[in-house]
Image (spheres, rainbow, N blue to C red):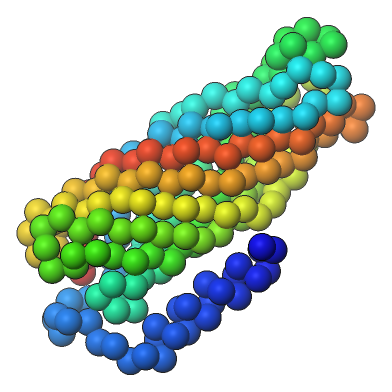
Amino acid sequence: MRISNFVKVLTCAAALQMGAGVALADGDKSPWQVRFRLIDVAPDESSTVSIGGEAEVDSTIVPELDITYFWTDNWSTELILATSKHDVSAVGTALGDLSLGDTWVLPPTLLMQYHFNTEGKVQPYLGAGINYTFFYNAESGDVANIDYDNGFGFALQAGTDFMLDDNWMFNLDVKKLWLNTDVSINDGGVTADVDLNPWVFGVGFGYRF
């Protein structure tokens, strides 16, 4: 499915929830929720490198903020914000193992979610959506003039909120992101097509206003 079609599906789903006019069960409960997590961003990379070998990208642990708006008791939209720095290398190439330096990755992700058991203490949820990944502040290692292309990708999510009281929650969350970038080195002298496709494991706390 093309990205544009997927965006249309998400937009229509949100519009249907808004148009349905289904009120939240608790009239005093705000539709807004925030969470703060620590996440382990673990790339599940694959690549094609013009001089042979393959790219390797390290894992990193960073803070993450997400903002959620509930259209109904069960349906919500979540915006996830986090940025991470990764060391990149190319191993087994015709030139040996090369350090490609490091780069910062910013993949803001928008998800439609469905929440189960919303009146209980344990509230699982599932989500699906899109991300747009920015690569910035790339620093070269053994090479010069390295450049990463930005781009769209898909995202899936599963998690559980453990309610501590009416507002506070403990959260466990896992996401799979599909991120691809075309890498150009030495002004195009060497190129690589890299699928980062990270797993993102998160633990943290949230607050429902």
In which image quadrant can residue 116 be found?
Answer: bottom left
Question: From the image, which quarter does the N terminus lie in?
Answer: bottom right
Q: Is residue 113 above or below residue 92?
A: below
Q: Is residue 56 above or below residue 24?
A: above
Relative image position of residue 65 (x, y in whole percent): 37, 52
Q: Residue at x 45, y 78 (%)?
A: 14
Relative image position of residue 6 (x, y in whole percent): 60, 67
Task: Kindly give the residue lying farthest to the top in the view shown.
Answer: 96
Relative image position of residue 11 (x, y in whole percent): 53, 77
Q: Nearer the viewer, residue 186 or 40?
A: 40
Q: Residue at x 36, y 51 (%)?
A: 158
Please indicate whether residue 187 sits to the left or right of residue 205 in the image. right
Please indicate whether residue 59 sits to the left or right of residue 173 in the image. right
Q: Residue at x 79, y 14 (%)?
A: 93
Question: From the image, which quarter does the C terminus lie in?
Answer: bottom left
Please indicate whether residue 175 sits to the left or right of residue 56 in the image. left
Residue 108 appearing in the image: no
Please indicate whether residue 124 sits to the left or right of residue 87 in the image. left
Q: Residue at x 47, y 78 (%)?
A: 13
Q: Is residue 161 above or below residue 100?
A: below
Residue 35 appearing in the image: yes
Q: Nearer the viewer, residue 63 or 115?
A: 115
